Image: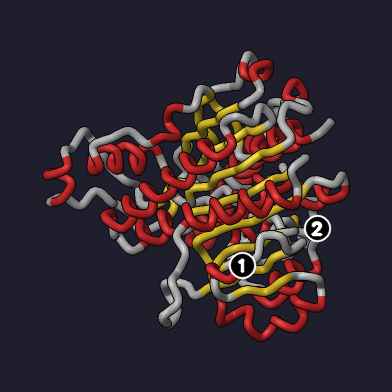
Amino acid sequence: MRKFWKSVVLKIVLALIISVTVVFGITVGGIRLHRLNLSERYNFDYLMGGANKVILFVGDGMGDNHIKVTEAYYEREMFFTSFKKQGHISTASLDVLKSTDSASVATAFATGKKVHNKEISTLNTKELPNITEYLESIGIGVGLVTTDILYSQTIAAYSSHTTNEENVSEIIVDQIRSDVDLFLGSGKSAYSAYKEVILGHGFSYYNNHSKIDITQNKIFGVFNSEEEEKTNETIPSLDVLTKTAIKFMETNYPDGYFLVIECGHIDKMCHNANIFDMMKYLDNFDKAVKDAYEYLKDDKGVSIIVTANHETGGLAYNGETKDQINSMDLITYDGHTLVDVPYYIYFGNDQINQYFLPKVIDNTDIYKICKALLSD
């Protein structure tokens, strides 16, 4: 009798395990299918040919509350929040049980495809064509700018393909072989070993921002990062890099270009629970956007997109004043979250300004918007 009941219990437990596994698998599969469907929800063909110059500003880790708390602290509105087209972006990757990471979102921005965390313009070992490769094939100039190391995820997705973001040498070699016209970012120590190879692929190579000659056809500017040993060289801020990038593009590609400009330190400061430096970097990010707008506002072919890849820090904000911010810990989490992040878009073309943009789009839609704008 004891053996009988033991057998019955084992069968019940096994049945429960199988049932839970099946339900779990169906649920995970359903969520993944839903996320894939999000990338097919909209097309933006009505934007076709709406711009010949597109600048995509990415505030790494920047959520709604990052903007609100920075506005409260500096007691003014961020300039980019004045852009007419506004909404939010869903940020999820194919990894249902993990928070979104920068690699998967950067890949969504660059290729229009959902991938797993850590994959760079690659899905399950299959390389995905990115927008910079397409634009270069039709004669559009491409520039990539960041305050972070140049092999970091956002820049890597637009200039390389690898199964894992940690494959640094693979990313660097891909970047050198790419048709990208301008690289500006940090990581001098990592790239110094590749200097001769970079030069051999037609780039002018710079470690000092003040020495850059924007009349050169291809530029690889890689500087000290704040994490590296500091020298007497000045580490260029994002607004400085932005001006250089625009001047280079206007000089070499006046008929059409695509610029990706990332502030990587909003995210970094939130991981470190440093809200004050986060606000400093976000404020400079806003200055870079404003400088770009002021430089190009008379050009009807310009579109400026401001968004984030994901939110970092679970930042809490409930109307606190500057004095209250000084004495409170508003960063509640040291990682990424899955909350939607904002987008703001300026169209210099009055005709496409008349079109409606959905209030909530997917991160893969950034690719579709940029590609449509720059296609004939």
| Residue under the point 65% across and 65% down | 213
Number of residue marks: 2
Classify residue 53 as left or right of residue 316: right
Q: Is residue 314 above or below residue 228?
A: above
* Residue 115 visible in the shown view: no
Q: Position of residue 93 (x, y in %)?
A: 60, 47
Q: Quadrant of residue 248?
A: bottom right
At label 2, counting other C-alpha atoms closer than 10 Å, the crowd grade (few under 14, some 14-19, many 20 or more) is some
Name the residue that disc number 1 marks: 212
The residue carrying mark 2 is: 127
Instruction: Please provide percent x and percent y for residue 371.
Output: 75, 37
Comparing labels 2 and 1, the label whose residue is closer to the camera: 1
Q: Are marks 2 and 1 in contact (CB under 8 Å)?
A: no
Question: Is residue 305 shown left or right of residue 160?
Answer: left
Percent coordinates x, y for residue 284 in the rendering: 40, 50
Q: Position of residue 188 (x, y in %)?
A: 56, 77
